Amino acid sequence: MTLQIELNGVNKYYGAFHALKNIDLAIKKGSFVALVGPSGCGKSTLLRSLAGLEKISAGELKIAGDLMTNVPPRKRDVAMVFQSYALYPHMTVEENLTYSLRIRGINKSEARKAAEDVATTTGLMPLLKRYPRELSGGQRQRVAMSRAIIRNPKAFLFDEPLSNLDASLRVHMRKEIRLLHDRLKATSVYVTHDQIEAMTMADHVVVMRDGVIEQQGHPLALYDKPANRFVAGFIGSPAMNFIPAQVSADGAQLHLAFGERRETFGLTTHLEPSRKLLVGLRPENLSLVPVGEGDFDIVIALVESTGSSTYVTTITEPELTIVVSGGRAMRSGDRMGLKIDPMSVHLFDLDSGRRLP
Ligand code: ATP
């Protein structure tokens, strides 16, 4: 396994503020890594540290095996792609693409050949003579990508590149970026606060919070076995439901606490009797059945249909979200049975929030 990027014990302080706390991260050559987390968690700081735009306070950062401590940004051989595109407005697409080659002394015809090669890959050939103002958002994004590709960098660093685009173009562009990554056999690090983007694009997702990596791994591993309550609530859409609960005296059942109300359902494994914990139920692992046929009954507070599926919110405290396919006949006020798939129950320690094995 060749590592393209390595961070060992990386820390970053802005004055007294500790923005990155002991970050260890190993990025394989050819992988697509997403850094994801809520606003302020440090993902941009981490990406900017890779690019050399921030100086790390402690630890070690290597790119392609070389220590980057004293290497300035332009010598790191990585390419940043931003949401703002940062295209030169007075230059054509071709000039935007060749600019970085020309300033490095590559002659005009060679630079043009390189631009045409990249434009063929990214579908920009027909647009080479246009100016940025004559392009759509998606096309501008493609120029920004192409400008990064033409430098043949050791890694692509994406800082929320799609957040300016409308929803359908985002979906299109995320496929396009991923396909380009595969075609170029590139190494990509992609910052986003959108967990769907992270899940669908990356083969390795890094979930951050408050400057710490909470969990990293394959997107489906994070979905199936979130290490703690934070990751469980962050990965998956709509978000996981959390209910305080207590194991029954015989260890075979769980009593869910909905305010004063207790609802019980059977476990497939035995747990420590009477232990208090937090139960996590994904909306897609709950189903609605006729009254009396589920684990317990609920009353529907709200029905939101997307056409293909329906999001149901219950009148409970805490409220539950349930996703059902179809579900067009459901109405608020309906009483129904709620069935919990016992194999899909996630359990977390009440105090630490850590997953229970
Ligand atoms: P967002 O999604 O909002 O961009 P982020 O996860 O990318 O958030 P960062 O931009 O990395 O977050 O910022 C991490 C923390 O460091 C934040 O609390 C931010 O306020 C702080 N921070 C960032 N840059 C500086 C700076 N130059 N000086 C002081 N604090 C900073």
Image (spheres, rainbow, N blue to C red):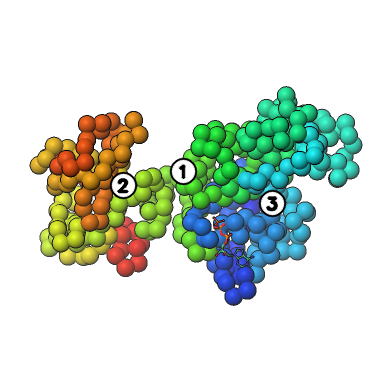
Label 2 neighbourhood size at 10 Å, few (<14), some (14-19), many (20+)? Answer: many
Residue type at mark 2 is Arg
Asked whether residue 351 is in view, the answer is yes
The numbered dot on residue 64 is: 3
Q: Position of residue 247 (x, y in %)?
A: 18, 60
- In which image quadrant can residue 146 be found? top right
Q: Is tag 2's residue or tag 1's residue first in the polypeptide sequence?
A: 1
Check if mark 2's residue and mark 1's residue have beta carbons within 8 Å. Answer: no
- In which image quadrant can residue 13 be found? bottom right
Mark 2–mark 3 Cα distance, whole angstroms, equals 40 Å
Q: Position of residue 192 (x, y in %)?
A: 54, 49
The answer to which of 282 and 302 lies nearer the viewer is: 302
The numbered dot on residue 84 is: none
Residue type at mark 1 is Ile
Residue at the spot of label 2: 282
The answer to which of 100 and 275 lies nearer the viewer is: 100
Q: Is mark 2 on a helix, strand or loop?
A: loop
**Residue drawn at 38 percent across, 53 percent down:** 233
